Amino acid sequence: MRQNEGDMTTAIYARFSSDLQTEKSIEDQVARCREVAAGYGSGLCRVFCDHALSGASTANRPGLKELLAEIAASRISILITESLDRLSRDQADLALIYRATKMHSVRLITASEGEVMAGSQGILQIGMRGMIGAMYLADLADKTRRGLMGVATSGRIPGGLSYGYRAIEGEVRGLRAIIPEEADIVRHIFERYAAGHSPRAIAKALNAAGTPGPRGGTWGVSVIMGNPKRLNGILCNPLYRGELVFNRQHKVKNPETGKARMVPNPESLWRRFEMPDMRIIEDALWNAVQARRDVAGKTRPEHHRRPKRVLSGLIKCGMCGGSYRAIAQGPRYGCANHRDRGTCDNSRSIMARDLEARVFEGLTANLLSPSSVEYAVACYRERMNELEGDKAKGRAKLERDISKHRQTVKMAQDQVRSGTMPPQWLYDAATESEGALKALEIQLANMDDPCIVKMHPGASKKYRRLIEDLNAALSTDDGQPARVEAVEAMRKLISSIIVSPAKVSGVTIDVEGDLAALLGIQKGGPIVGALGAGTGFVRNYNIVPFRFAAR
């Protein structure tokens, strides 16, 4: 429901893109919008803005998100922006913003096009502007790609800096120069690898010597080896042999999050350019390294059926916080930063089977007791009571808002029945209330029914049997369906496993898990009936995690 007119505010939204405009653009947009606001009798305006952010998505714009939240709270009466494409260039996003303004009776005004009207005229205007904005983005992407291709064709380098090179300052962009000190490091890596040294040994030696990595940090195996399909990493970068490979990948943006990721292009779309001035590695050394990489990249026969470890990806080093992963000889678990980079002093390792057994025994010992289930359900019940209280307050507010809108509509209807034409302000208010009533009534009808959680008398016994069945399945052979399912179930119970050196010898293991996952209580999902915890759905639920030491 809208607040009193005295509580309403005129909002100004401004945005500029980092690729085409500067900070001054925000000031210019706001100044122009203030002039428009003055024409509508609005003096005090709240300004919402996003700096150096694209209009292709609304997900990554905090200023726009704050504005939409204020509109949803009925604290905005007029929204002024320089043009509709400042709000969004995406058709779907622009339509959603327009729908929000109409739902909350916000007048949408642009400095360049005037007020966006309600009804079919406004929908047509929004649709046209959204289509133009989408076409602009597509055209901009094509022109950008064409411009970058022109840079590469002219012998310059589009994109970021590779290790070993620096940008040459000047009016002409894309010129590079070799950094002699870093070029020596590149040659050293190629020569050591061609001589048979492992990437791990090379990285540890560079870190021990205090040589900064490409980004100023430490060296790692992935930095050196890279990905031959993406042509990144030291040993895969063709620029070191004097060749630029352009158009290897393209950017794809997630419309929901606004985040972009790079997707490889097929090799048929790659463009290659010779750049002899950028050569650091001679062809003979380059070919020797690539030949060894090809052999090393093939999976050895004895590794084809190596089973994935049960706890892979869940274990962290207690000293550096890095990954504790499976290594050779056993296999065993060890600190990746100690083994690959030499940057952690945690040299302790543990047989994979021993660590898994200790974790499973700890889970069984700490989670078999009936008190564990009782505690989890008690926490869940407490949280559900809080949610029900919040829901009751929300329901009461909705009912009050519906009553006020109904009174406004009734006032107008009574005057019509009596033969009196309602004044314009009452007619407008009644029209607004009719639209708001439909939305509020739907919202009230869709409110969840209360969820009642009860502790089933046999929950503890069922819970014990589930754990025992889980342990039995885990003891079966690798690859068996029962074990595969048990492994997935066990992994869902564990948030993290911290392995630290013990005072004398060996390691200490601390496990953190989630009792909610154990009971089948999932965010937005049903409670597992087998545990007798009841039925219903959980929203925004986060139970206290459990912790124990697997000695």
Image: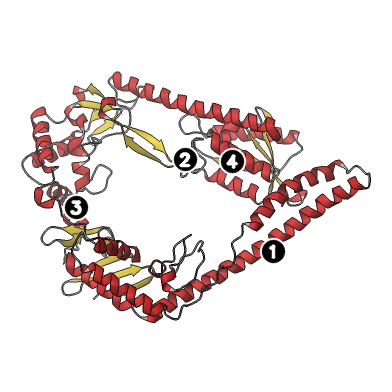
Give the answer, above or below, for where 307 lies relative to 33: below
Q: Amino acid at mark 2?
A: Pro
Q: Mark 3 and mark 4 in contact (Cβ < 8 Å)?
A: no
x, y percentage for residue 504? Answer: 16, 75
Q: CA distance from mark 2 to mark 1?
A: 36 Å
> Which is in the foreground here, disc 3 or disc 1?
1
In terms of sequence position, does the residue under pointer 1 or pointer 4 come before the other?
4
Q: If you read the primary sequence from the N terminus, does the residue marked by circle 2 or circle 3 appear first?
A: 2
Which amino acid lies under the numbered mark 1 shown in the image of this protein?
A: Ala
Disc on res. 396: 1
How far across and down, in percent of the image, does residue 459 sit? 41, 77
| Residue identifier under label 2 | 255
Relative side of 43 to 312, left or right: right
Position of residue 156 measured from the top left corner of the image (x, y, whole percent): 29, 23
Give me the C-alpha separation between circle 4 and circle 3: 49 Å
User: Could you tell me how far apart the alpha carbons at marks 2 and 3 are, in whole angstroms?
Assistant: 37 Å
Q: Residue at x 30, y 31 (%)?
A: 265
Q: Residues within 10 Å of mark 1 (few under 14, many from 20)?
A: few
Q: Does dot 4 land on a helix, a strand or a loop? A: helix
Label disc, if present, on residue 341 of the rendered structure: 3
- Left or right of 11 in this view: 263: left
Q: Quadrant of residue 466?
A: bottom left
Look at 33% across and 22% down and name the residue there: 149
Q: Nearer the viewer, residue 38 or 141?
A: 141
Which amino acid type is marked by label 4? Leu
Q: Residues within 10 Å of mark 2 (few under 14, many from 20)?
A: some
Q: Alpha-carbon distance for marks 4 and 2? A: 13 Å
Q: Quadrant of residue 117?
A: top right
- The quarter of the image holding the C terminus is bottom left
In this figure, which residue is indicated by the disc labeled 4?
A: 96
Q: Quadrant of residue 488?
A: bottom left
